[in-house]
Image (tube, grey):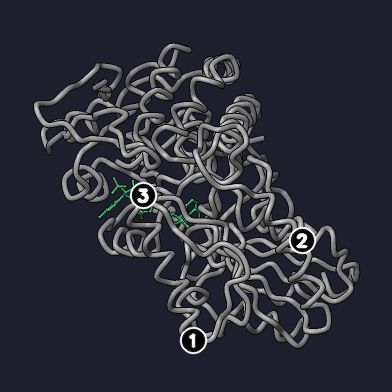
Amino acid sequence: MKKYCVYIAGEAVESSDWIDVNDPYTGEIVGRVPSLGEKELDRAVEATHLRGREVLTRFQRFEILNRAKEELSRRAEEFSALITSESGLCVRESRYEVGRASDVLQFAAMEALKDDGQIFSCDLTPHGKARKIFTLREPLQCIASITPFNHPLNQVAHKVAPAIAAGAPTVLKPSLKTPLTAIRFVELLYSCGLPGWMLSVLTGVDSVIAEGLVRHPLVEMVSFTGSEKVGKRIAREAGYKKVVLELGGNDPLIVLSDADMQLAVKLACEGSFRNSGQRCTAVKRILVERGILDEFVGKFVEMARSYRSGNPRDPETVVGTVIDEAAAKVLEERVIAAVASGARVLLGGKRLGALMEPTIIVDVPRDCEMVVKESFGPLAPIMVVDDLEDAIQLTNSTAYGLSSGIVTRDLNKAIYAVKKLRVGTCNINEVPGYRIESSPFGGIKDSGLGIKEGVIEAMKFMSNIKTFSLPW
Ligand code: NAP
């Protein structure tokens, strides 16, 4: 079985202990990664640190990122196949993911070239002086980035590319469920000229590597994307550090009675089933106004039949597996529990190994676990609402606040929803997950601390502002 070494500041590292990575569809081992210990962790943080080094010039950062974008596009099929093999995401999704990661690299390359300073004249008030204050940004010395399984490449790109653009060294800890793509991506960046000391990638058990990074005194910032449970633990343990937490979601698609029905149905399918429903911003609840419920449900079921689940490598497959059988079982149990509380399954509902069918469920009680918690998979629970006010109240009632989609032709209602929903993003006539890779992105409440990602915001957080003033 193929062994993947990891890298400490560009140097390949192996171990006597190896961790298996499985294909969720076939169950086969698709690779092995080293299980590193505290010694390697310390060595990585020491070596992946700006300490005394010259920050890469803007042109160097641009060149590395731009080359990486070209190289990733050239090797798109190889990366797509690797993502599919370790995540069970179907080829349509893994190809899409490679495209998104290329966009991240492109935006980061563009941002690296921009000046980020400001100038303040000081003679603006009677107390002023003939001086000017200038700002510049300095990169953090060492960032720890911890990424989830659901976008094995794009989540890694969203941590690493802005750090390179900002000039900040990063120690990356990818999910042990999908570390292979992350390791190949790091190798790609080295091959495009990234100096070893700018990036390390480590694998090992969480109690040693992930928790060790979070606590390490030389780490100035922890950038974490993953579950609420682990995120809150990091918030407690990180101590005196910058912390970015991008956590779970429970996003609604609100369908109002004046909606374009074909659009609403399309958005419900794409939002619920893309990426096997494993996007933090996947549609997790569909809130439909009472008067159009029957029409919406009929058309939704009809269109959803074309979302074929099965072998992720089959080009005809639209919905691959979820990450593993245990995750699929949780989804299956939530369907069973919802049915026991009065819900009805109109499509799907069955599980085979890690494959969960795209599932449409109606009459879902508002207090059901499926809709109160994050159900990370291709489940589409439909809940009836009286009006927009009721939809807003229901949306705001859960612990999460990541994103939302509202389908309506009424701009006044759209604006009202934007103002009243307690979430990080509102997309009108779009899925909650719509974004571009450079726009600000992130949630509030249990979905995150409100510190945004997206290339531009991430670069700001990965650097510190220094001001200096001169007589003028
Ligand atoms: P997870 O279980 O929280 O894991 C995320 C990362 O944290 C993995 O690398 C994991 O390593 C690591 N980890 C586990 N225990 C840790 C600990 N004690 N200390 C530090 N790190 C630890 O999340 P997941 O299941 O991979 O990802 C799915 C979740 O991510 C969902 O809730 C989804 O909504 C969320 N997500 C949020 C966003 C966003 O932008 N808001 C985007 C994508 C995903 P191992 O996997 O090796 O155990």
Pointer 3 and pointer 2: residues touching (CB < 8 Å)?
no
Disc nearer the start of the sequence (3/2): 2
CA separation, marks 2 and 1? 26 Å
Find disc 1 in the rendering and name its residue: 341
Residue 449 screen position, x and y as percent: 48, 63
Find disc 3 in the rendering and name its residue: 324
Pointer 2 and pointer 1: residues touching (CB < 8 Å)?
no
Pointer 1 and pointer 3: residues touching (CB < 8 Å)?
no
State whether residue 101 appears in this view.
no
- State left or right for residue 85 relative to residue 238: right
Q: Could you tell me the amino acid type at mark 3?
A: Asp
CA separation, marks 3 and 2? 28 Å
454 above or below 270?
Answer: above
Residue 448 screen position, x and y as percent: 48, 62
Task: Report crowding for label 1: few under 14, some 14 to 19, many 20 or more residues within 10 A (C-alpha).
Answer: some
Label 1, secondary structure: give it.
Answer: loop
Number of marks in the rendered image? 3
Label 2, secondary structure: give it.
Answer: helix
Q: Could you tell me the amino acid type at mark 1?
A: Ser
Which mark is drawn over residue 265?
2
The one nearer the camera, 237 or 190, is 190
